[in-house]
Amino acid sequence: MTMHMVGPYLTTTGKRKGKQKHRNAAAANKARKNAESWQALLDKYEIKDAATKVRSTARVATTSGYSPAHDPKRSTRHIPSLDTGQGLAARPADKVYTGDAMLGVSVLHKSNGIPVFRQEDAIDISKMRRG
């Protein structure tokens, strides 16, 4: 595969952000003070790094040795489907016209079925509405 066929998600320059530039000296000082206060807070509660703290708790949870016997969200392991033997769905009843107002079905153009209710309609359809 050549590089022109690959999307923008692939990069050859790496994904790490470089050193952050600040707008001015005041913004740089503010960012530096925030970083120092954050580090002081981490030191106060004896946290090495926020990212490693999250990873270490996730590791402890997966290696704790506890595994439930079954899924705690379900009270039963499996509920079988009801097999009626009639297929996936019941077939609807055929639609049949049972009235006496319609005289019949006529074809006007290219298998276009049209219901005929009056004798005049049948005559018009037979003349293709030309007269």
Image (cartoon, rainbow, N blue to C red):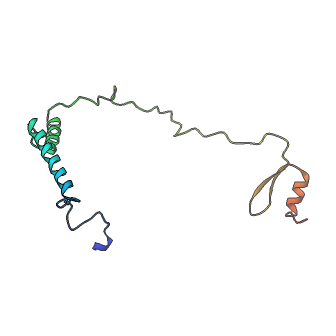
Percent of width and height locating residue 60: 14, 36
Give the position of the C terminus as an image quadrant. Answer: bottom right
How many numbered discs? 0
Which residue occupies the foreground of this view, 112 or 55? 55
Which residue occupies the foreground of this view, 106 or 42? 42
State whether residue 89 is above or below residue 14: above
Percent of width and height locating residue 57: 15, 37
Residue at the top extreme of this rendering: 75
Percent of width and height locating residue 53: 14, 40
Q: Give residue 95's quadrant in the image.
A: top right
State whether residue 61 is above or below residue 76: below
State whether residue 60 is above or below residue 106: above
Residue at position x 18%, y 61% in the image: 18
18 vs 130, left or right, is left
Which residue occupies the foreground of this view, 120 or 95? 120
State whether residue 105 is above or below residue 81: below
Give the position of the N terminus as an image quadrant. Answer: bottom left
Residue at the front extreme of this rendering: 26
109 vs 54, left or right, is right
Residue at position x 63%, y 40% in the image: 92
Residue at position x 14%, y 43% in the image: 37
52 vs 107, left or right, is left
Which residue occupies the foreground of this view, 123 or 96? 123
39 vs 10, left or right, is left
